Amino acid sequence: MSTDHTAESWDHDLDDLFITIGHCFRRVEPRRRMRDYVRGLLAPVARKNSWQLAEQAGHATPDGLQHFLSRARWDADDVRDELHNYVAQQLGRPGGVLIVDDTGFLKKGITSAGVQRQYSGTAGRTENCQIGVFAAYASTAGRALVDRELYLPKSWTDDPERCRAAKVPEERQFATKGVLAQTLVLRALASPLPITWVTADAAYGQEHRFRRTLEKAGLGYVLAVPKSQFAAGCPRIDYLFAQAPHEAWVRRSCGQGAKGLRMYDWAAVRLPVVSEFDYDDGELVRERWALARRGEHKPEEVSYYLGCAPVGTAVDELVRVAGSRWAIEECFQAAKNECGLDQYEVRRYVGWYRHVTLSMLAHAFLAATTAQEREKGATPARKTRSSSSLWQKCGDSWQLTLPTAPANLRMR
């Protein structure tokens, strides 16, 4: 295929996307600004702020794009809903995984909505920054960011005057990152996205309410948890796996990485069933799992997971879901490097949502285009009392048996 034909096809597909979301912008002017803005986000612009995007679009000043982000009448949530539909159509596949994580946006000053000195996993330290909680969708076709919420610390929600200055809606109250993550999951479930699994890091996996939300929704999950996690009446998860027999650890791939297959030693054990959500008309329909992952050259570095899956789910599938969590990190990197996700200069609440949503849309377009091109071209720990005796071989996996398991026991 010639380069000219590829560019023409790319431009045609982008116009189709603009037509699809055009109804989110009732007036012609914001609709045109949206096109200019998204095209600029996809263009090789050094820094994708209003000034450089305006120059890319041929505008004399950035006033039009700044008005578009701050004062024009349109709702970023309408665009987000269309983003759900677009990703479902382009990347939706059976076995799809929803991934939840947060990322930081380094900022100066104290006026940007939600900014304060707080820990940023992106920077790996405490910085003056905003934190956004995001959801990404990953399937065999590709991966893309699909939703977002700005985390507002109590230093903001307890200061109404500060919130008014940043145009934070009055109804917006303090919500933990875990609560924001639940919101993202429930919205995704109400969308056309075909979601079978959810995965997240330990900041979310350790939250009982988050796990319970997934169980009520009937979703399978594999969530990272801290080593001190207790589950299903078992010992601490690190103590549990310290007693795993040598043969319980099996070398498995958790997906492709930048340097090929990501290979680790994995151990997986079925946990006692202790939740009413695991039964349907008295029949067991879901099983609970604990997993551990260690590197070949650093066996002392172990990561732990809790899982909930339909009866009969293979360990390799649980490992695949656990490994898919890295997809959202790749989405963050691509959206920031290629679509200006973190290059905004807006300070108000509404501006953040508008820029971030359009950046996510641009990133989803790149992911969909990549998927289409791919298809065309295809041709040591403390011991606990008798815990080692609780590990029993069961077929090709391991099962945990407890002497007694109270019927009303709940995962914590």
Image: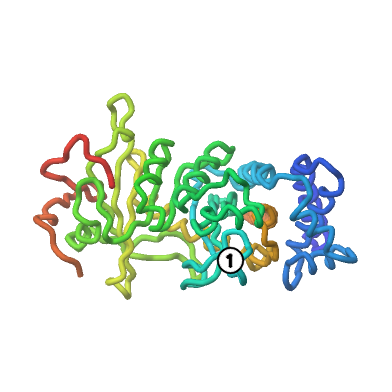
x then y, percent, for residue 32 = 84, 51
x then y, percent, for residue 238 = 24, 61
Identify whether 46 is placed above or below 235.
below
Q: Residue at x 31, y 31 (%)?
A: 279
Q: For this rendering, which residue is in front, 121 or 237?
A: 121
Is residue 353 at least partly visible in the picture?
no
* Residue 196 left/right relative to 312: right
Disc 1 target residue: 105
* Residue 385 left/right relative to 277: left
Identify residue type, mark 1. Phe
Identify whether 404 is placed above or below 5.
above
Numbered-mark total:
1
* Residue 342 left/right relative to 27: left
Q: Residue at x 67, y 57 (%)?
A: 348
How is the model colour-coded?
A: rainbow
Quadrant position of residue 285: top left
Quadrant position of residue 51: bottom right
Helix, strand or loop for disc 1:
strand
Q: Residue at x 43, y 36 (%)?
A: 217
Q: Residue at x 46, y 52 (%)?
A: 176
Instruction: Name the image quarter holding the N terminus.
Output: bottom right
